[in-house]
C-alpha cells in the first residue's frame, strides 16, 4: 500500500507537469509562428450575456463572425453580471460587448465602462419610444435596446373570467374564490421575507408614491426622493391593509421561488408577474389572460416599471470598432430581434418586429398593452440605494408593521446611502 | 500511554523494511531530479512570454524563484522549508497578495465611480461627451490604408448617401476621392480592420464643425466632443455653456463651482477616513454589537453542533460488528456531496410559512424566517444539516487512526465503553480535531452563503433595514458596502480589517491554548 | 434482545435517524427532479408525476456532459495536488521544530478569514495578467482554475492533517531515524501510510469543496465549454428562469453528487480499513 501511495502521487505529479509542459510548447509554437501583436488582437469579438441570452445569441454571433471573417465568442456570466463586467473591464479582461438591463447605465457610465453609441435617425425612429428613452442617459444613447419587459396581471380565466377593474375588485374576487375553496391564495404577488420593490411598485405608484422626482429635462432627479414623502406613507398604508394583518392578499410567504408555481398549480387566480411566467402557465395548461395591474379605486394608474434589455459597447474592450459595428449595425436588424424574441418571448424593441410578432402571438400584444403606461426603470446610480430598504419596508408593512415609522426608517437609510 | 506504544513502534520497523527504504532512496533521487527538471522546464516556458512582452521585473522574479527552488532542494539544509515552500508559493500568489491588495484599498476611495485612474476618468468624460453635430450627414464608411494592411497609415473613405459624393479623410481633413478604392489605397476587410480596432476608434478626420469619426466599420458620423480637459488648469470645460469642473485630487472627482460633480471620478488615497467612518457611522454603532454577539453564537453553535452530532454518528458507526455501515455512511454524507448553494435555497423554501415542507409535514403554521429566534434556530439547523457530515467524516477518520490496542487495553482493565471513550479516545480526538474546530469556527464566523442564501440576514426590524436578526458581520458588511449606492470597496475593506482583527484576536487566544495539548501528546 | 440493542441496535437507530435527517431535503430535490412540471411549488415529498424529462433536457439543452468532465478533472487534479501540498506542510508543522512554526500555523488560519468577495478584485488583477502572458493557464482553462484553488491548499487541510500527524507518536520517526531513514523516508514510508484514513478524508473533503465551488469558478470560467457543474447549474436558475428550470436544476444537482459518491466509495476502504487491524502494522 505504501508503494502504491507513493507511486500514485509520483505518477500524478509527473502527468501534471507533463501536461503543463506539453501545453506550453504548443502555445509557444503558435506564438512564434505569427506576428505577435496582430495575432493577439486580430478579429476577435467577445460578447457577455446571461446564460439564456448567450445561448440565443450564439448562432447570430457566429453568423456575424462568418460574414466578417472574425471570430465571435459568446460567453455566459451567471451571477452578478454588472459587477463582474465592471471589475473585469477595469482589469482589462472584460468583453467587447455586454448584454444587460438598461438600468445599469448610470453605474456603468460613472465607471467609464461603456461608450455612447451613434444611431442614425432612421435607426432611432425604428425603436419604440419608451425603449429609446430608457437607454438615453445625460442626453446620450448608451446602448441598443432589443426587448422590453414589464409586469402585468396574469389571470386564470377558468377561475376568474373577468378582469378586475380595480385592486379592490381583484381582492373581492380572490376572497370569493378562497372561500369557495377554488383557490388558496387571493393574489400571487411575490414579496418574500425581504420584499420585492420591483413587483410592489405598480401598487405603490397607484396609491400615490414615487421614487424620484424628475428634472425639467425629464430625467430622474436624485435630489428629490419620494420615499418618506406623505404619498409614500399613504401607499405603504395601502400595502399594509392588503397585507397579512388586513385582507391577506399580500403575504411574505409568496416568494420569487413559489409565486409562479402557485399560480400554475391553480392555487391562486391572479399572478402579478412578467412575460417570463407565461411559458410555465402554457406548460401547465392554464388558460390565462394578461391585463395591466389594476389600480386602487379612484387612485392613480398602477404603472409598472419598463425594463429594456440592451447591448452595450464596452469602453475598455480590445476590439471596439468591431463591437460598434456589431451593436449599431447588426443588432438593429429585424432578423436578430425576431430570433431573440423566439428564444425569450418579450416584446421586441423594434417597432416593426413588435408589429409582426403581435399578429402571431397575442401575448406579446397584451404585454405591450399592459406596459403602455410603464415608466422606464430609473437608470441613475442612486437607484441602487432604493431596492433593499424599500423591499424590507414593504415586507415589514405586509407583516403588519406601522407604515409611517417603517417608511421613515427606509427613507433615512436610502438618503444616507445616496449622500454617502 | 506513550510507554504502551513504544513496543509496537519499534516492532513496526523490522529489518527488511529498512533495507527497502534505502534502496528506494535511489528512486527518490531520480524523482527529485525529474521534478526539478520540470520546474526548470516550466520556468523556461514561463519566461518566453515575459521576454516577448518585456516584463523584466516579472522575469527577474521568475528567475529568482526558480533559483531559490533549485537551491532549496539541492542543499541538505532547510528541511522544514522543503516541505513548506511548494504550498506556500501558491499561497503567496493567490491568497496573500489578494489579501494585502484588498487591505491596501481600505486607504482609498476605490468603489463605483472611483475605479480607475484620473487619465481613464478624463478619457471617459471626453468620450461620453462626443455628440453628433446636429443636422450633419450620416456617412457610409470604408477603412483604407496605404501600404501594408497591418501597419500602413489609415484613411477613411466616406460616402454621402444623399449626394453620392465620395471623399477620403485623414488627419489633414477631407478631400474628394478620384475612384473607389482611390489609387494607392487598399480597402481593409472586417478582419484586417478589427485587428487595428483601437487605431480606427481613435481616428478622427477634422472638419470645420467637429470631426468625422467611425461608428463601427461601415458608418461614420460627424461628431464633436462637448467637454474637453485642459491640462494647464487641470479642469474639464463644457464648450456649449462654458461650465468648468475643477479636479479635486482629495476626493477624486471633477467638481464645479456650484458643487456639481461629474459622475466619472478616479481612485485616490483617502488616508484613514474609511476607518473613522466605520467608527463614527451611527448605523454601524447602533447595530454592530448585536451583530457581533450573534455572529459568535452562530459560529460556536454551527461548529459545536456539527461536531457533536458528527462525532456521535461516527462513534455509533464504529462497531465492526455492525452491518450496512458502508451504506449508512454514504447516505449520511450525501448532504455534503450536494452543491451547498442549491441546498441552501431548498432549505429556504422548506421554511416557508404557507408552502414550506416543514410546516406542512408538522401541520403547524410557524413563521420560521419571520421572527428573530425562529430564524436563528432555522439557520443553525441548516448549518447542522450541511456541516455534520463533514465532522462525521473527520471524526471517523480520527477514530480509525486511534490504535485499536488502546481500546483493547482499557477493555482488559474492565472500563465501561463510555469511560473508555472519555479516558482514551476523546482526548486523542481533541488533539487531532482542535485545530480543525478552530478553523471551522473561523470559517463559520464568515460564512457568507449560509446566511445570504437563506435569510439574507433577516428578519429585519421595521425601523432598521440595516441589521437583521441573523446577520453575520460579513453579510452586514456586504450590505453596507454594496447595498447602497453601488460598490464601496475601500469602505468594505476597512470594515473587513476591523472584523479581521476581532477574529484574529479570538482565534489567536484559543490557539494559544492548544499549545498545552500539543506538548502533552506529541 | 436488550443486549443486542445495547451493542448494535442503538447504532442502527442512530444511523437510521441520521440518514433520515440527511435524506429529507434531498428527497425534496429528487421529487422536483422527476416532477415533469419541475417547479418549487411542490411542498410535499411526493411528486405530482414521474418522468425522466428533466434528465433528458439536461443532456439535450445544456452542456451537462462537458461540465461534468470539467468538474471531475478540475476537482480531481486540484484535490490530489492540494492534498499532497498540505500533507507536506502538515509534516513540517507537526514533525519539525523551526522558528515561526506556530505563527505560521496561526497565519494560515487567519489568511482564510479574509472575505472572499473583496479579494475577487485582486484575483482579477492577477488573472488578467496571467491570461495576457500565458493564456494556457488563464481564464477559461482547467489549469487556471486549479492554480487558483491551490492557493487555498495550505488552508484548512494543513490544519486537519497536522492534528492527525500529532497523534502519531514521535518515537516512530525517532526509531526510524536511528535505522537510517531520511526525512523523506519517514514522511512517505511511515507517516503517510499511518494517517491514510485522514488523507482519504481530507482528499474527499477537498474534492467536495472544489467540485461545489462556484463563486470563483463563475468569474473565471465564462466559455460555455469551460464551465463546471456548479457554475453551469447555477446559471440555469438565474433570475426569471428560476421556476422554469428548477426541475432540470434538481436533476443536475443529483447527478453532481455522483462523482462525489464515487470518490467516497473508492476512498471508503481507506477510511474504514485504514488501521482498524492495528495502528502500527502499517
Image: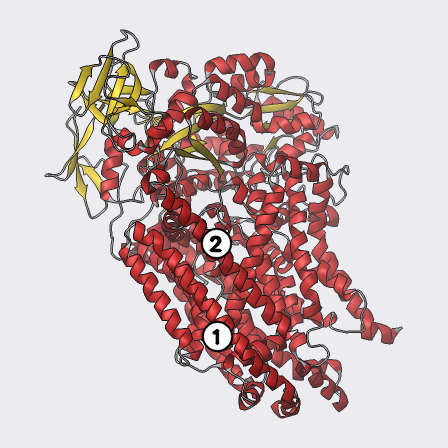
Judging from the image, what secondary structure is the residue with disc 2 in? helix
Mark 1 crowdedness (10 Å alpha carbons): few <14, some 14-19, many ≥20: some
In the picture, measured across the screen, residue B518 lies left or right of residue B503, that is right
Residue placed most toward the observer, B161 or B250: B161
Residue B133 sits in quarter: top left
Residue placed most toward the observer, A73 or B402: A73
Residue placed most toward the observer, A57 or B490: A57
Q: Is residue B261 visible?
A: no
A181, above or below B488, in the image: above
B111, above or below A275, in the image: below
Extreme top residue here? B163
C16, above or below A277, in the image: below
Extreme right residue here? C1
Tell me what residue is drawn at x 72 percent, y 88 percent.
B409
Residue placed most toward the observer, A141 or B41: B41
**Chain of residue at mark 2:** A
How far across and down, in percent of the image, does residue A325 sit?
37, 25
Q: How is the image coloured?
A: secondary structure
The residue labelled by disc 1 is: B510
Q: Which mark is residue C270?
A: none
In the picture, measured across the screen, residue B63 lies left or right of residue B152, that is right
A275, above or below B271, in the image: above
Q: Which mark is residue A22?
A: 2
How far across and down, in percent of the image, does residue C193 sit?
62, 76
Label 2 or label 1, whichever lies nearer to me, is 2
Marks 2/1 same chain: no
In the picture, measured across the screen, residue B386 lies left or right of residue C11, that is left
How far across and down, in percent of the image, does residue A322 sit?
37, 29
Tell me what residue is drawn at x 22 percent, y 41 percent.
B119
Tell me what residue is drawn at x 16 percent, y 30 percent.
B243
Residue A215 sits in quarter: top left
Amino acid at each position: 500500500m505504501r508503494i502504491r501511495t507513493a507511486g500514485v502521487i509520483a505518477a500524478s505529479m509527473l502527468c501534471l507537469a507533463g501536461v503543463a509542459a506539453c501545453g506550453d510548447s504548443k502555445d509557444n509554437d503558435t506564438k512564434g509562428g505569427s506576428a505577435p501583436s496582430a495575432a493577439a488582437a486580430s478579429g476577435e469579438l467577445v460578447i457577455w450575456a446571461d446564460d439564456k441570452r448567450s445561448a440565443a445569441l450564439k448562432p447570430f454571433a457566429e453568423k456575424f463572425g462568418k460574414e466578417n471573417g472574425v471570430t465571435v465568442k459568446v460567453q455566459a456570466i451567471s451571477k452578478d453580471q454588472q459587477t463582474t463586467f465592471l471589475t473585469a473591464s477595469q482589469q482589462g479582461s472584460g468583453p467587447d460587448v455586454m448584454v444587460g438591463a438598461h438600468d445599469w447605465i448610470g453605474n456603468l457610465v460613472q465607471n467609464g465602462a461603456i461608450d455612447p453609441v451613434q444611431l442614425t435617425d432612421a435607426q432611432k425612429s425604428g425603436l419604440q419610444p419608451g425603449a429609446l428613452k430608457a437607454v438615453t442617459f445625460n442626453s446620450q444613447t448608451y446602448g441598443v435596446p432589443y426587448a422590453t419587459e414589464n409586469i402585468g396581471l396574469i389571470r386564470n380565466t377558468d377561475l376568474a373570467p373577468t378582469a378586475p377593474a380595480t385592486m379592490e375588485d381583484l381582492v373581492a374576487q380572490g376572497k370569493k374564490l378562497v372561500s369557495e375553496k377554488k383557490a388558496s391564495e387571493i393574489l400571487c404577488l411575490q414579496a418574500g421575507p425581504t420584499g420585492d420593490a420591483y413587483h410592489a411598485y405598480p401598487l405603490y405608484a397607484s396609491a400615490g408614491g414615487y421614487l424620484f422626482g424628475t428634472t425639467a429635462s425629464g430625467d430622474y432627479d436624485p435630489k428629490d426622493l419620494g420615499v418618506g414623502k406623505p404619498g409614500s406613507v399613504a401607499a405603504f398604508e395601502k400595502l399594509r391593509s392588503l397585507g397579512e394583518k388586513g385582507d391577506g392578499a399580500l403575504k411574505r410567504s409568496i416568494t420569487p421561488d413559489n409565486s409562479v408555481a402557485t399560480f400554475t398549480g391553480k392555487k391562486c387566480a391572479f399572478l402579478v408577474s412578467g412575460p417570463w411566467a407565461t411559458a410555465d402557465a402554457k406548460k401547465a395548461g392554464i388558460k390565462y389572460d394578461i391585463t395591466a395591474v389594476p389600480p386602487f379605486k379612484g387612485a392613480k394608474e398602477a404603472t409598472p416599471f419598463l425594463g429594456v434589455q440592451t447591448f452595450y459597447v464596452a469602453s475598455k474592450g480590445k476590439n471596439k470598432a468591431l463591437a460598434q459595428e456589431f451593436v449599431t449595425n447588426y443588432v438593429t436588424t429585424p432578423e436578430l430581434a425576431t430570433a431573440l424574441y423566439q428564444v425569450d418571448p418579450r416584446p421586441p424593441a423594434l417597432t416593426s418586429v413588435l408589429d409582426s410578432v403581435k399578429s402571431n402571438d397575442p401575448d406579446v400584444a397584451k404585454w405591450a398593452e399592459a406596459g403602455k403606461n410603464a415608466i422606464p426603470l430609473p437608470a441613475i446610480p442612486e437607484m441602487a440605494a432604493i431596492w433593499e430598504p424599500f423591499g424590507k419596508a414593504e415586507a415589514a408593512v405586509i407583516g403588519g408593521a406601522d407604515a409611517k415609522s417603517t417608511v421613515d426608517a427606509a427613507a433615512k437609510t436610502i438618503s444616507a446611502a445616496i449622500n454617502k | 500511554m506513550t510507554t504502551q506504544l513504544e513496543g509496537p513502534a519499534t516492532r513496526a520497523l523490522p529489518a527488511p523494511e529498512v533495507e527497502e527504504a534505502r534502496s528506494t532512496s535511489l528512486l527518490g533521487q531520480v524523482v527529485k531530479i525529474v521534478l526539478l527538471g520540470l520546474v526548470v522546464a516550466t520556468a523556461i516556458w514561463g519566461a518566453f512570454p515575459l521576454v516577448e512582452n518585456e516584463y523584466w521585473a516579472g522575469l527577474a522574479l521568475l528567475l529568482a524563484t526558480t533559483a531559490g527552488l533549485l537551491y532549496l532542494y539541492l542543499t541538505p539544509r532547510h528541511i522544514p522549508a522543503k516541505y513548506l515552500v511548494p504550498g506556500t508559493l501558491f499561497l503567496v500568489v493567490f491568497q496573500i497578495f489578494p489579501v494585502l491588495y484588498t487591505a491596501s484599498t481600505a486607504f482609498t476611495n476605490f468603489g463605483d465611480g472611483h475605479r480607475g485612474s484620473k487619465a481613464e476618468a478624463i478619457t471617459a468624460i471626453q468620450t461620453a461627451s462626443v455628440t453628433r453635430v446636429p443636422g450633419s450627414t450620416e456617412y457610409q464608411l470604408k477603412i483604407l490604408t496605404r501600404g501594408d494592411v497591418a501597419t500602413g497609415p489609415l484613411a477613411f473613405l466616406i460616402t454621402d448617401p444623399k449626394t453620392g459624393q465620395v471623399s477620403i479623410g485623414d488627419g489633414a481633413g477631407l478631400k474628394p476621392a478620384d475612384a473607389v478604392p482611390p489609387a494607392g489605397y487598399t480597402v481593409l476587410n472586417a478582419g484586417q480592420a478589427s485587428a487595428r480596432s483601437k487605431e480606427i476608434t481613435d481616428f478622427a478626420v477634422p472638419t470645420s464643425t467637429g470631426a468625422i469619426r467611425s461608428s463601427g466599420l461601415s458608418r461614420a458620423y460627424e461628431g464633436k466632443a462637448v467637454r474637453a480637459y485642459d491640462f494647464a488648469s487641470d479642469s474639464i470645460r463644457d464648450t456649449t455653456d462654458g461650465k468648468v469642473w475643477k479636479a479635486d485630487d482629495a476626493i477624486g472627482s471633477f467638481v464645479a463651482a456650484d458643487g456639481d460633480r461629474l459622475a466619472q471620478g478616479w481612485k485616490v488615497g483617502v488616508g484613514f477616513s474609511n476607518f473613522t467612518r466605520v467608527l463614527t457611522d451611527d448605523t454601524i454603532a447602533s447595530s454592530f454589537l448585536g451583530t457581533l454577539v450573534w455572529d459568535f453564537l452562530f459560529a460556536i453553535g454551527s461548529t459545536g453542533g456539527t461536531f457533536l452530532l458528527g462525532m456521535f454518528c461516527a462513534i455509533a458507526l464504529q462497531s465492526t460488528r455492525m452491518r450496512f455501515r458502508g451504506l449508512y455512511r454514504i447516505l449520511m454524507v450525501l448532504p455534503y456531496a450536494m452543491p451547498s448553494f442549491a441546498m441552501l435555497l431548498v432549505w429556504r423554501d422548506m421554511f416557508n410559512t404557507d408552502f414550506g415542507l416543514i410546516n406542512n409535514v408538522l401541520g403547524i403554521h410557524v413563521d420560521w424566517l419571520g421572527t428573530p429566534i425562529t430564524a436563528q434556530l432555522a439557520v443553525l439547523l441548516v448549518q447542522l444539516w450541511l456541516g455534520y457530515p463533514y465532522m462525521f467524516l473527520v471524526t471517523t477518520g480520527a477514530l480509525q487512526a486511534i490504535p485499536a490496542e488502546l481500546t483493547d487495553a482499557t477493555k482488559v482493565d474492565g472500563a465501561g465503553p463510555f469511560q473508555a471513550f472519555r479516558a482514551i479516545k476523546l482526548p486523542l480526538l481533541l488533539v487531532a480535531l482542535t485545530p480543525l474546530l478552530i478553523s471551522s469556527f473561523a470559517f463559520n464566523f464568515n460564512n457568507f452563503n449560509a446566511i445570504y442564501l437563506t435569510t439574507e440576514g433577516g428578519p429585519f426590524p421595521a425601523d432598521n433595514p440595516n441589521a437583521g436578526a441573523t446577520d453575520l458581520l460579513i453579510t452586514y458588511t456586504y450590505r453596507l458596502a454594496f447595498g447602497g449606492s453601488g460598490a464601496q470597496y475601500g469602505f468594505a475593506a476597512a470594515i473587513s480589517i476591523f472584523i479581521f482583527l476581532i477574529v484574529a484576536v479570538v482565534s489567536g487566544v484559543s490557539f494559544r491554548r492548544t499549545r498545552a495539548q500539543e506538548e502533552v501528546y506529541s | 434482545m436488550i443486549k443486542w440493542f445495547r451493542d448494535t441496535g442503538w447504532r442502527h437507530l442512530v444511523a437510521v435517524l441520521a440518514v433520515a435527517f440527511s435524506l429529507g431535503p434531498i428527497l425534496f430535490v429528487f421529487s422536483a427532479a422527476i416532477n415533469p412540471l419541475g417547479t418549487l411549488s411542490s411542498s410535499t415529498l411526493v411528486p405530482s408525476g414521474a418522468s425522466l424529462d428533466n434528465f433528458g433536457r439536461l443532456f439535450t439543452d445544456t452542456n451537462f456532459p462537458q461540465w461534468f468532465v470539467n468538474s471531475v478533472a478540475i476537482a480531481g487534479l486540484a484535490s490530489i495536488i492540494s492534498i499532497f501540498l498540505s500533507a507536506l506542510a502538515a509534516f513540517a508543522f507537526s514533525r519539525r521544530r523551526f522558528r515561526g512554526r506556530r505563527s505560521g500555523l496561526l497565519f494560515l488560519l487567519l489568511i482564510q478569514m479574509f472575505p472572499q468577495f473583496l479579494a475577487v478584485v485582486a484575483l482579477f488583477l492577477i488573472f488578467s495578467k496571467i491570461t495576457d502572458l500565458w493564456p494556457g493557464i488563464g481564464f477559461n482553462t482547467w489549469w487556471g482554475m486549479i492554480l487558483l484553488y491551490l492557493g487555498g491548499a495550505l488552508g484548512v487541510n494543513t490544519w486537519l492533517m497536522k492534528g492527525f500527524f500529532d497523534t502519531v507518536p514521535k518515537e516512530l520517526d525517532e526509531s526510524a531515524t536511528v535505522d537510517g531513514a531520511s526525512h523523506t523516508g519517514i514522511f512517505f514510508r511511515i507517516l503517510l501510510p499511518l494517517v491514510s484514513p485522514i488523507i482519504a478524508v481530507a482528499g474527499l473533503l477537498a474534492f467536495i469543496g472544489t467540485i461545489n465551488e462556484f463563486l470563483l469558478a463563475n468569474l473565471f470560467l465564462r466559455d460555455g465549454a469551460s464551465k463546471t457543474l456548479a457554475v453551469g447549474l447555477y446559471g440555469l436558475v438565474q433570475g426569471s428562469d428560476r421556476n422554469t428550470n428548477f426541475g432540470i436544476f434538481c436533476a443536475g444537482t443529483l447527478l453532481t453528487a455522483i462523482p462525489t459518491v464515487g470518490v467516497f466509495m473508492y476512498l471508503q476502504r481507506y477510511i474504514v480499513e485504514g488501521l482498524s487491524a492495528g495502528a502500527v502494522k502499517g
